[in-house]
Image (spheres, coloured by chain):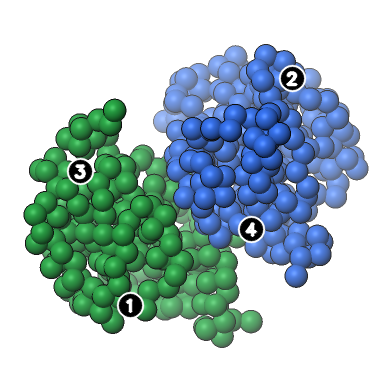
Chain colours: A blue, B green
Amino acid sequence: MERPLAERAEARPFHVVTPLLESWALSQAAGTTVFLKCENVQPAGSFKIRGIGHFCQEAAKKGCSHLVCSSGGNAGIAAAYCARKLGLPATIVLPEGTSQPVVRRLQGEGAEVQLAGKVWDEANLRAQELAKRDGWVNVPPFDHPLICVAKCLGAKTAAAGALACARELRVLSEVVEDREAVDAVQRFLDDERMLVEPACGAALAAVYSGLLGRLQAEGRLSPTLASVVVIVCGGNNIDSRELQALKAQLGWR
Amino acid sequence: MERPLAERAEARPFHVVTPLLESWALSQAAGTTVFLKCENVQPAGSFKIRGIGHFCQEAAKKGCSHLVCSSGGNAGIAAAYCARKLGLPATIVLPEGTSQPVVRRLQGEGAEVQLAGKVWDEANLRAQELAKRDGWVNVPPFDHPLICVAKCLGAKTAAAGALACARELRVLSEVVEDREAVDAVQRFLDDERMLVEPACGAALAAVYSGLLGRLQAEGRLSPTLASVVVIVCGGNNIDSRELQALKAQLGWR
């Protein structure tokens, strides 16, 4: 017999302790020891399982009977994964143009997929509408105190948790070019044998493109860094074909 | 001041607890739940760090002053990594034809590289010779009670530990074709975003090629497998160029 929901929700977190690996290749590139926090090997393929796993467990404890999420990306996959592990039904609402592989991936996790609207904002409205039903809970893909800090490249406002961190801690916010991010994805694949999304490649590009050295030369970063940790946040939306397409788009030979 | 060697050797193991991830794509292929034991995210890139890390720590406790190893592959990288962490010098002896990237990788770990002989057997003789020096210890790349079970595709005899396991447990020893192993490497890269050596792809090929299903149909494996664990043993000797070369060699379009 299945364990009751409250018991399943009290179980250990869905995320795992990921390895912190010293990278020889990135250390060479940075001129100091670089460690990789490998969030790409979290269940459901990205760091998103941390906040969303916690949110879903809390929702289940409070009697949630159905999870809803309006992301077809890593947040949606994480929500569908958590729902399956909790034994709860899940509905993922996506814009009408969503690709078939994404739909199949989510259905593979046992989620119901509904297509609504042309863009994420519209799908999100539909998700919020569904979440008004009794026992249904909306899993916000990035901005919620329990999910706290997460990124969404298409979001129009910063997550409140991220903003608070930026105010409290010394944060250097730097921009890398698309080409540098995709270059970093390719180099990381060859150096560390892991394939990540360009959004994750952006953090790696800070090392590969020499950004750290430039910040040191400008006096904005200490000239003697004992070590650097790069969070390899991961992401499911990449494969070798997609990487080739990105390279072609950027005029790569 | 540096901690004394005995203290460094008493520290926690060099290997880490790697994630055990449920794979949606491989579960689809197998028709049952497949878990991946991700040894590819061990320090030094493969499962080899387990046995070799333990061996090197034991050697250090017994007063070893210099480590020697005759592998340019994953065992040699693991030995060089352990030596650096223990603060011990290491000499890696390799056949003369060894590629420059392998030499640089090992030198990057702080190891001295010596080239000796045409094939591994000859380099190994030289390593055994060096290990006669006072305080020097040879790290056998695969066959030693402390290292226990490991594979070496070029070895002429099975490791004693592997043989003992094969006698004690029920083992189905199956062969997969090179093409199936390389096909599995490509599919695994696209499905799970990890790039592994074909030797690791061979285990994945047991799922992707339908071998499990054939064993079930033949009555050699239970028709109702609750779940399957595939050990993703990893390995450093692969990058996208090497994968393309392997595919070209096998007549892939």
* Tag 4 near tag 1, CB within 8 Å: no
For discs 1 and 2, the disc positioned in front in the rendered view:
1
Q: How far apart are marks 2 and 4 (CA)?
A: 31 Å
Mark 2 falls on what kind of element? helix
Looking at the rendering, which quadrant does residue B87 occupy?
Answer: top left
Please say if A3 is above or below A232.
above
Same-subunit check for callouts 3 and 4: no
Q: Which mark is residue B216?
A: none
Please say if B105 is above or below B250.
above
Number of other residues with Cα within 10 Å of mark 2, as a class: few under 14, some 14 to 19, many 20 or more: few
Question: Disc 3 designates what residue?
Answer: B57
* Chain of the residue under the numbered disc 4 shown in the image: A
Q: Residue B96 carries which label?
A: 1
Q: Who's the residue at 58% across and 33% down the image?
A: A223
Q: Who's the residue at 64% across and 39% down the image?
A: A212
* Chain of the residue under the numbered disc 3 shown in the image: B
Number of other residues with Cα within 10 Å of mark 4, as a class: few under 14, some 14 to 19, many 20 or more: many
Question: Disc 4 designates what residue?
Answer: A186
Looking at the rendering, in which quadrant would you find the C terminus of chain A?
bottom right
- Residue B159 vs residue A8: left or right? left
Mark 1 falls on what kind of element? loop
Q: How far apart are marks 3 and 4 (CA)?
A: 36 Å
* Chain of the residue under the numbered disc 2 shown in the image: A
Q: Position of residue A246 (x, y in %)?
A: 76, 59
The disc labelled 2 sits on which kind of residue? Leu
Q: How far apart are marks 1 and 3 (CA)?
A: 29 Å
Same-subunit check for callouts 3 and 2: no
* Chain of the residue under the numbered disc 1 shown in the image: B
